[in-house]
Image (cartoon, rainbow, N blue to C red):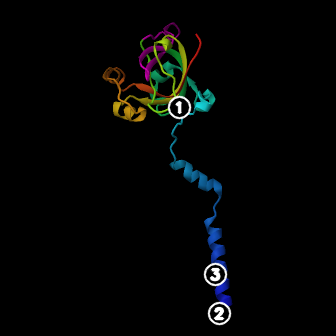
Amino acid sequence: MKKRTAIFFTAFIALALFGSSCDTSEHDGATERGMTATPVVNSETYPPSAAATGATHSVADITGAPNSTIGKAVTVVASIDEVYSSRAFKLSEDSSLTGDAGRGLLALIPKVGSFPNIDDQWKNNKARVTGVVQRMTPKDVEREIGWELQPNLETKFKGKPVLIVRSVERLNK
């Protein structure tokens, strides 16, 4: 009887071990589908390369066809047209190149993270800004950035695409 129990017990353990192992690609794929990406700002990798963070887009690409970029990471190289605060500024392209001086892309810097202080010295300078494009819905955007928007920015940019900044770098003229 002891021999029969020992064989049964050994077979049960072998079956349990065999059944619990699965191909790692199956396991990893199941995990990745349920995960969401949360960008982390790290001073060692600041600013990240454009290749690692998304394709380079123009302001006109984003403002002209926002549905194709909503929710995607993009890198934009453009002039800082307006500085609204140390965490909010408007990007625009040279109007002589695009023929459209009125369009701009609001860029918002989250409260958390290591970012340079944006001030009037940045105005009329080019910057490389990487971030995620969202549609301006004040409650959703405020939750993402961690601070309240100025009422004039809510009104001016409501329903338009905005760029939630992950990295920003001032470029030489």
Q: CA distance from mark 1 to mark 2?
A: 66 Å
Task: Report the residue at 46% width, 13% height from top.
Answer: 120
Q: Is residue 90 magenta?
A: yes
Q: Does dot 2 land on a helix, a strand or a loop? A: loop
Please state the extent of the stretch shown in magenta in the rendering. Answer: 80-101
Which of disc 2 and disc 3 is earlier in sequence? 2
The residue type indicated by label 2 comes to: Met
Q: Is residue 104 magenta?
A: no
Q: Does dot 1 land on a helix, a strand or a loop? A: strand
The quadrant where residue 86 appears: top left
Judge left or right: residue 128 versus residue 86: right
The residue type indicated by label 3 comes to: Phe
Query: On the rendered image, what quadrant is the N terminus found in?
Result: bottom right
Q: CA distance from mark 3 to mark 2?
A: 12 Å
The residue type indicated by label 1 comes to: Ala
Residue 1, disc = 2
Q: Does dot 3 land on a helix, a strand or a loop? A: helix
- Residue on which disc 3 sits: 9
Q: In the figure, 66 relative to 10: above or below?
A: above
Task: Report the residue at 32% width, 22% height from top.
Answer: 155
Residue 39's spot in the image, x, y percent? 52, 36
Label 3 close to label 2 by CB (< 8 Å): no
